[in-house]
Image (tube, grey):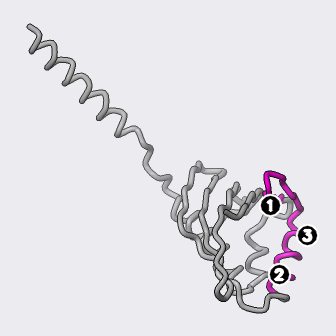
């Protein structure tokens, strides 16, 4: 009797664990477009294509940089000016590439967690961007919120 109870419990545990392991949702059908959008965000910045970079943002976007636990938040105009000046005054080119992307989305909005690496000559910095994107009425995506920080 003990062996058959053990067998039933074992089968039940296997059944439950296989049900939970198959609960991860399939990627959203448009996830590839969000990945492509984010790759364009990084490549336009790295190529100093500031018009292309600016086109990634919604006009009402807010950008926050977290340093020592304190946010410094700007509107998109001030943020883009700062990014343009960073490139203009850099002694060596800056290249930023995504290392890892995790995307959660539906048909109207997406959140993306992106680990990145910034290289400037021999200097290498890593960090994280946390994006909130919205679907534009004419199609495509726009950043409505960006929170970023260095490691």
- In the image, is residue 67 part of the stretch drawn in magenta? yes
In the drawing, does residue 63 fall left or right of residue 1? right
Q: Nearer the viewer, residue 110 or 99?
A: 99
Residue at 74%, 80% in the rendered image: 52
Q: Around disc 3, counting alpha carbons within 10 Å, would you say few (fewer than 14), some (14 to 19), or many (20 or more)? A: few
Separation of marks 1 and 2 at Cα, in angstroms: 15 Å
Please identify, in this view, whether the residue under mark 3 or under mark 2 is nearer the observer: 2
Look at the numbered disc 1 and give the secondary structure of its residue. strand
User: Marks 3 and 1, how far apart in space?
Assistant: 13 Å
Label 3 – label 2 distance at C-alpha: 12 Å
The nearer-to-camera label among 3 and 1 is 1
Quadrant of the rendered image containing residue 46: bottom right
The residue indicated by pointer 3 is 78
**Eyeballing the image, is 103 above or below 89?**
above
Q: Check the picture and name the quadrant holding the C terminus.
A: bottom right
Sequence-wise first label, 1 or 2: 1
Q: Position of residue 64 (x, y in %)?
A: 81, 58
Image quadrant where residue 118 sits: bottom right
Which quadrant, please, contains the N terminus? top left
Q: Which residues are magenta?
A: 61-87
Q: Of the numbered discs in the image, which one, if any, rests on residue 65?
A: 1
Q: Residue shown at 54%/56% (left/top)? A: 102
Nearest to N terminus: mark 3 or mark 1: 1
Residue 53, position in %: x, y? 74, 76
Dot placed on the residue nearer the N-terminal end, 3 or 2: 3
Q: Which residue is mark 2?
A: 86
């Amino acid at each position: 009797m003990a062996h058959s109870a053990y067998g039933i419990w074992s089968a039940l545990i296997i059944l439950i664990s296989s049900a939970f392991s198959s609960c991860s949702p399939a990627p959203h059908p448009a996830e590839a477009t969000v990945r492509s959008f984010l790759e364009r965000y990084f490549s336009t910045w790295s190529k100093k294509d500031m018009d292309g970079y600016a086109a990634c943002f919604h006009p009402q976007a807010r950008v926050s940089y977290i340093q020592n636990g304190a946010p410094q938040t700007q509107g998109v105009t001030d943020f883009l000016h700062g990014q343009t000046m960073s490139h203009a005054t850099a002694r060596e080119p800056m290249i930023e590439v995504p290392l890892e992307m995790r995307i959660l989305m539906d048909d109207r909005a997406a959140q993306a967690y992106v680990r990145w690496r910034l290289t400037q000559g021999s200097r290498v910095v890593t960090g994280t961007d946390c994006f909130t994107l919205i679907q534009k009425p004419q199609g495509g995506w726009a950043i409505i919120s960006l929170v970023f920080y260095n490691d």
